[in-house]
Amino acid sequence: MAKSNLSSKTISKIIYLDYAASVSPNPSSIHIEGVNARVKLEKARKDTATALYAQPEEIIFTSSGTESNNLAIQGLLVGCWTPEFWVSNTRQLSHIITTNIEHPSVLETCRILEQRGLAEVTIVAVEENGIVDTRKIKKEIKDNTVLVSVMYANNEIGTIQPIREIAKEIRHFRKNKKSNFPVFHTDAVQAVNYLNINVEQLGVDLLTLSGSKIYDAGRVGVLYKRKSVKLMPIYGGGDQEMGLHPGTENLSEILKFSNALQSVQKIKEKENKRLVKLQDYFFMKLEKMSKAGFDTNEVGVVINGDRENRLPNNINITISKIPSDLLVIELSAYGVMISSKSACKSSSEKGSYVITAIRPALDRKIGGVRFSFGRDTKKADIDYTVASLIKIINKLKKWYY
């Protein structure tokens, strides 16, 4: 294709007559405006890669974290359906290992693949503190294991998983077997604002991010894919994003995402310190609730998830006998907005499967409630929340105790 020295800056007037392609300049178009859009897209890709200590060609933009997780799992599975893999693994089904507290986009995708006879799936139970034992992951790895998917930080109880340790065990297995499998994927959607996302230090091969959890970021997802990992598209329709995500790139949202991702890296350390202080203060207030007019031995307030190895903005508690959904509704009447389960499961009448995973004997209706902090959260907000909670418990005691 012939090259042009023209740019939109040298043209006095732009007449856009490519609306059939897109109502705004399309990065796939070869006219000047399309080329300019492509330049912006690739800069966003480079900036995103820099934040992850990755290469630009290892960054795939998708529509959401859910889609990125699906591309990682299903795309890898399809990529494994090669003659070489089948011969080396004596035609066994591809094996996937994950945990029982993963986001629904991982857990349900794995279950669907197993139900359809497309994969063998092992779901490893986490410990009572909400953290998976690395030794249990290691024990389940076998010759036909193609993927291990363990989330970096849980979206409900905030527990941080031992990603580096799991990656180390996977590397040892691959080295001993002289194999490229299993591939290691982590859903880092909840972790991005607070934890180290250097993919080389983490030792992961696939990593998912989502703009929905980053301030001022666009509605876009990202999948980091190490160069050596072979993925196949999970649907057809175009060759965008290295052929792995068909469809016109949402440039405006991608630009918002890359800018926001860079911004959050700059303030991460300072903001974490502030949030840790708020979290400690909330924990202290919970411990002192017994002085506020009721006996905590009678009511029972339990912290869900490990006390230390958790995100600095997360507190999840169970209040015995009182249904979590009722607490959400009661607190909202006071102007305090919290949640009782994953937002992706908020319409489900079932309780939180994450709370059930760490407290299997608990009535699912009781469950747990999650308080999660953000940039606007202040100490006074915690005071008001705890005071409101005390009023609610005292009101509900006569019905539930």
Image: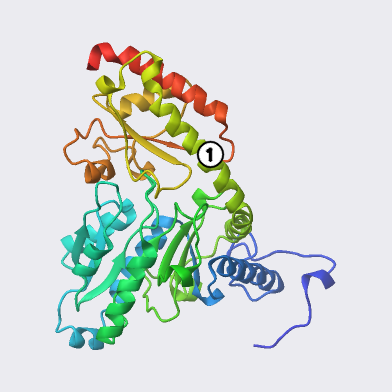
Looking at the picture, how far across and down is residue 43, in whole percent?
A: 64, 69
Say which of 224 and 151 sits in front.
151
Quadrant where the C terminus is found in the figure:
top left
Q: Quadrant of residue 256?
A: bottom right
Quadrant where the N terminus is found in the figure:
bottom right
Q: Quadrant of residue 116?
A: bottom left
Q: Which residue is mark 1?
A: 277
Q: Mark yes or no: residue 234 visible.
A: no
Using the image, determine if residue 348 lies above or below residue 153. Answer: above
Q: Quadrant of residue 293?
A: top left
The amino acid at mark 1 is Lys
Left or right of 302? Residue 237 is: right
Q: Residues within 10 Å of mark 1 (few under 14, many from 20)?
A: some
Please give the name of the residue rendered at 77% of the width and 65% of the height, measured from the top-left corner: 14
Total marks in image: 1
Please give the name of the residue rendered at 25% of the width and 79% of the height, measured from the top-left corner: 81
Say which of 102 and 24 sits in front.
102
Looking at the picture, how far across and down is residue 40, in whole percent?
A: 66, 67
Say which of 238 and 137 sits in front.
137
Looking at the picture, how far across and down is residue 299, in whole percent?
A: 28, 21
Q: Secondary structure at mark 1?
A: helix
Please give the name of the residue rendered at 46% of the width and 19% of the height, measured from the top-left corner: 387
Left or right of 393? Residue 141 is: left
Please give the name of the residue rendered at 18% of the width and 41% of the height, measured from the top-left corner: 360
Say which of 379 and 365 sits in front.
379
Looking at the picture, how far across and down is residue 16, in whole percent?
A: 70, 64
Using the image, determine if residue 364 lies above or below residue 85. Answer: above
Left or right of 389? Residue 250 is: right
